[in-house]
Amino acid sequence: MAAKGGPETEDQQKLRFQVELEFVQCLANPNYLNFLAQRGYFKDQVFINYLKYLLYWKEPEYARYLKYPMCLYFLDLLQYEHFRREVVSAQCTKFIDDQQILLWQHYTRRRTRLLQSQAEQVQNQIAPNTNGQSQPQKT
């Protein structure tokens, strides 16, 4: 994005950051991976090099901006030619999509139970004080 022969401006850097963030997060969608595969992007060495470049998103200072961390898992898989060949198949994509949904459902239920359990523990540790205020009990 930089002008020929010159460094990127701050605005260009922000735009590149936003575009790359959005693209990396799109990789969490198996149907989008299938779309890219069917159109031959995964056979283009320039595009494969770009996917390799995007691995910097795994660094904590960048990963903290991701809403869909599953995209990093797929970014890793896209480094392998075998995965890039397989994701062109609608059957493979459907399987990945189903597994991803099951993972999210399990994670959500488990996370909800964990949060409820922690809330109950906090409630059980708080006992009324003689002044009507709550204080944690010593255990």
Image (tube, rainbow, N blue to C red):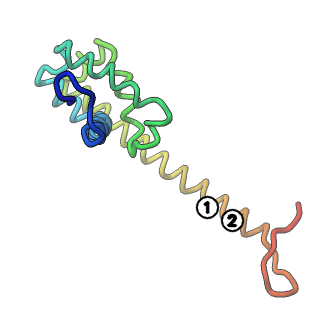
Farthest residue to the bottom: give it: 131
Residue named by callout 1: 116
Relative side of 82 to 127, left or right: left
Residue at the spot 78% in from the left edge and 77% down from the top edge: 134
At horizontal 39% and vertical 46% (from top left) the residue drawn is 67
Q: Nearer the viewer, residue 111 or 53?
A: 53
**Vertical placement of 80 versus 122: above or below?**
above
**Is 10 above or below relative to 54?**
below
Indicate the quadrant where residue 90 lies.
top left
Residue 112 horizontal side relative to residue 22, left or right: right
Q: Which quadrant of the structure image shows residue 44?
A: top left
Q: Nearer the viewer, residue 122 or 50?
A: 50
Q: Position of residue 37 (x, y in %)?
A: 18, 23
Q: Tag 1: residue type? A: Gln
Where disc 1 sits, the SS reads helix
The x and y percentages for residue 126 are: 78, 71
Residue ID for mark 2: 120
Image point (17%, 14%), residue name: 43
Q: Position of residue 46 (x, y in %)?
A: 20, 15
Q: Is residue 126 above or below residue 27?
A: below
In what element is the residue under mark 2?
Answer: helix
Image quadrant containing the N terminus: top left
Measured Cα–Cα span from mark 2 to mark 1? 6 Å
Q: Are marks 2 and 1 in contact (CB under 8 Å)?
A: yes
Extreme-front residue of the structure = 6
- Which is nearer the eye, 97 or 50? 50
